[in-house]
Image (cartoon, helix red, strand yellow):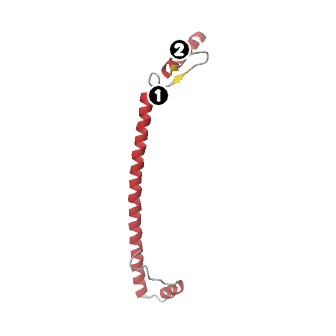
Amino acid sequence: MGKHENIKIYPTELVRLINKNNTQFRLKDNEIAHDIINELIKKLIERLNNLEKELITQQKEIEERFNRLEQFVTQELVSKNGLQYRPPNRKEYISLGATLTDLYERLNSLENNCL
């Protein structure tokens, strides 16, 4: 991690040094802790930068997919021959618009006949 990688303090010695209230140990311990914290902050910054790059890439891919979907829906699906349906008892397919018009006319007919 830093310049203190090779320092090894065994748990029993650590407890003994802390109990003695060893000033030199506490200063060294603080120095080691600061180095570790600095390294952790550097790693966090690096990971956040990588995450930000990945999110930007994902956002571009999502926008591209949405644009393709929008193009498909507006230019192909709802076009004159885009979505076809063959109602029962009919030989030919009709467009979505013609199907909706037919349904609307039938509903109006039912409403007018019931009133």
Give the side of residue 101 with respect to residue 49, left or right.
right
Query: Regarding mark 1 in the picture, which secondary structure is present there?
Result: helix
Relative to 77, is 113 above or below? above
Residue 35 in the image, given as x and y percentages of width and height:
39, 75
Q: Which residue is mark 2?
A: 105
Where does the N terminus fall, quadrant-wise?
bottom left
Circle 1: residue type: Leu
Relative to 103, is 67 above or below? below
Q: Residue at x 57, y 14 (%)?
A: 111
Toward the viewer: 30 or 6? 6
Relative to 9, is 64 above or below? above
Query: Regarding mark 2 in the picture, which secondary structure is present there?
Result: helix
Circle 2: residue type: Glu
Residue 66 in the image, given as x and y percentages of width and height:
43, 39
Q: CA distance from mark 1 to mark 2?
A: 23 Å
Indicate the quadrant where residue 62 lies: top left
Residue 108 in the image, given as x and y percentages of width and height:
54, 14
Q: Residue at x 44, y 35 (%)?
A: 69
Residue contact between numbered discs 1 and 2, judged by CB atoms under 8 Å? no
Where does the C terminus fall, quadrant-wise?
top right
Q: Earlier in the sequence, mark 1 or mark 2?
A: 1
Residue 85: mark in rendering: none
Residue 56 in the image, given as x and y percentages of width and height:
38, 50
Q: Residues within 10 Å of mark 1 (few under 14, many from 20)?
A: some
Relative to 30, is 87 above or below? above
Q: Residue at x 40, y 58 (%)?
A: 50
Q: Residues within 10 Å of mark 2 (few under 14, many from 20)?
A: few
Indicate the quadrant where residue 27 lies: bottom left
Q: Which residue is mark 1?
A: 77
